[in-house]
């Protein structure tokens, strides 16, 4: 990401578990402290991991709090969509609130930011409830790379490939597309 960020014209570079308008994300059940409902009655949240710079790269506007930063490394913090905030904490400020997801560790997340609702899953309808966790929470074998540039995006494809391959020539970069 540092090397990509240093390319001429690059404004932001980030990784995510699900590129905008593509598949690859998954759902977790979100549970607030003290909520004793059965798992089947709890809300299913779309769950994505992202690195610092992701929200800025796709211009996903911050409504409250803050985005992730490199100084947050190792913390279980979450940025949530506005719909998630309104659904889980009706009429309350979600910042600083905690919740757990159905994972092996079940360690609680603390909400540090709320982003606007968007259309990152489908252009046909608004996004479902989304939780964004920092990428160090759950590293996948597959990640998508998001690069915002002032250059012609298609012209940046080869520079992006070469930069990725300068770190590891064995990493496939199967498709580069513009958003």
Image (cartoon, grey):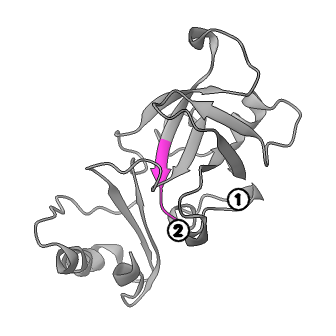
Q: Position of residue 137 (x, y in %)?
A: 47, 50
Q: Which image quadrant for residue 161? A: bottom left
Binning the other alpha carbons within 10 Å of mark 1 as few (below 14), some (14 to 19) or many (20 upward) gives: some
Tell me: residue 116, above or below residue 174: above
Instruction: Indicate which disc residue 53 carries.
Output: 2
Q: Residue at x 54, y 64 (%)?
A: 73
In the image shown, does 104 or 14 lie closer to the viewer?
104
Q: Where in the figure is residue 156, as x and y percent of width and height?
A: 29, 79
Which quadrant of the rendered structure holds the N terminus?
bottom left
Residue at left 71%, top 62%?
Answer: 66
Which residue is at the front of the view, 74 or 175?
74
Q: Horizontal placement of 162 versus 36: left or right? A: left
Q: Position of residue 159 (x, y in %)?
A: 24, 81
Query: Distance between the Cα atoms at labels 1 and 2?
Result: 12 Å
64 left or right of 168? Answer: right
Determine whether, in the image, residue 56 is placed left or right of residue 157.
right
- When asked about the image quadrant of residue 178, the answer is bottom left
Q: Which residue is mark 1?
A: 62
**What element does badge 1 sit on?**
strand
Q: Which residues are magenta?
A: 48-53
Residue 12 in magenta stretch: no
Q: Nearer the viewer, residue 64 or 127?
A: 64
- Badge 1 vs badge 2, beta-carbon distance below 8 Å: no
Q: Kindly identify the residue that appears in the image at 86 percent across and 43 percent down.
A: 93
Report the number of numbered marks. Answer: 2
Q: Is residue 107 left or right of residue 158?
A: right
**Residue in view at x 45 percent, y 56 percent:** 136
Of all residues, the one furthest to the bottom in this rendering is 8
Counting from the top left corner in percent of width and height, residue 79 is at 64, 50
Q: Residues within 10 Å of mark 2 (few under 14, many from 20)?
A: many
Q: Earlier in the sequence, mark 1 or mark 2?
A: 2
Image height check: is 29 above or below 51? above
């Amino acid at each position: 990401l540092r090397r990509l960020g240093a390319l001429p014209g690059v404004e932001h570079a980030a990784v995510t578990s699900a590129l905008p308008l593509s598949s690859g994300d998954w759902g977790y059940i979100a549970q607030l402290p003290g909520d004793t409902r059965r798992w089947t009655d709890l809300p299913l949240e779309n769950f994505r991991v992202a690195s610092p710079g992701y929200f800025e790269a796709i211009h996903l506007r911050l409504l409250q709090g803050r985005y992730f930063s490199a100084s947050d490394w190792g913390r279980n913090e979450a940025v949530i969509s506005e719909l998630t905030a309104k659904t889980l904490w009706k009429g309350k400020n979600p910042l600083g609130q905690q919740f757990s997801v159905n994972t092996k560790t079940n360690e609680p997340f603390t909400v540090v930011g709320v982003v606007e609702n968007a259309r990152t899953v489908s252009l046909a309808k608004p996004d479902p409830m989304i939780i964004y966790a920092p990428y160090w929470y759950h590293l996948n074998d597959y990640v998508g790379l998001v690069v915002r540039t002032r250059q012609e995006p298609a012209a940046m494809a080869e520079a992006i490939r070469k930069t990725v391959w300068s770190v590891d020539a064995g990493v496939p970069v199967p498709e580069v597309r513009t958003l």
